[in-house]
């Protein structure tokens, strides 16, 4: 399911998903990583803390990372969201 969520988030943000990797931790937690043609997105969960961290790193004028975030908010329905936007230097 996380594979589909990451691929859909990539598509909604006008990014091309190249590869998805998922790792489930024992006894709980999961990390999902999608490598994009335009960089990457990742999701890390800590169910025991009721916490989910999402990183969206994209480049290019055609990408819309906020669309990925909107979709992920719809999927996970968080009670609280904190956003830190970091502008990177131009290449």
Image (tube, rainbow, N blue to C red):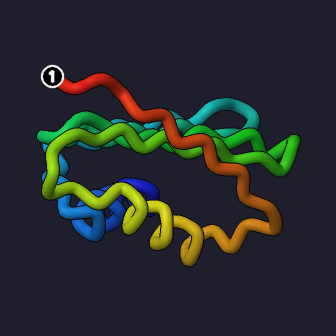
Residue at 31% over, 37% down? 40
Residue at 14% over, 57% down? 62
Residue at 36% over, 56% down? 65
Instruction: Say left or right for 90 vs 41.
Output: left
x, y percent for residue 7:
28, 59
Q: Can you say whether 38 is above or below 83 in the image?
A: above
x, y percent for residue 71:
46, 72
Instruction: Say left or right for 91 vs 29.
Output: left
Looking at the rendered structure, the number of numbered marks drawn on it comes to: 1
Secondary structure of the residue carrying tag 1 is: loop
Seen from this angle, which residue lies furthest front?
Answer: 90
Residue 87's quadrant in the figure?
top left
Residue 21's quadrant in the figure?
top left
Seen from this angle, which residue lies furthest bottom?
Answer: 74
The foreground one among 36 and 83 is 83
x, y percent for residue 60:
15, 44
Instruction: Say left or right for 14 vs 54.
Output: left
Residue for badge 1: 91
Q: Quadrant of the C terminus?
A: top left
Residue at 29% over, 60% down? 64
The foreground one among 89 and 68 is 89
x, y percent for residue 25:
63, 31
Label 1 crowd (10 A; few <14 / some 14-19 / many >=20): few
Residue 1's quadrant in the figure?
bottom left
């Amino acid at each position: 399911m996380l594979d589909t969520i990451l691929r859909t988030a990539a598509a909604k943000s006008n990014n091309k998903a190249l590869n998805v990797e998922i790792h489930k931790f024992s006894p709980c937690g999961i990390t999902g990583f999608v490598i994009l043609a335009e960089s990457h997105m990742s999701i890390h969960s800590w169910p025991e803390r009721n916490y989910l961290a999402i990183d969206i790193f994209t480049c290019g004028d055609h990408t819309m990372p906020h669309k990925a975030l909107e979709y992920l908010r719809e999927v996970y329905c968080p009670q609280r969201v904190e956003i830190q936007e970091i502008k990177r230097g131009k290449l």
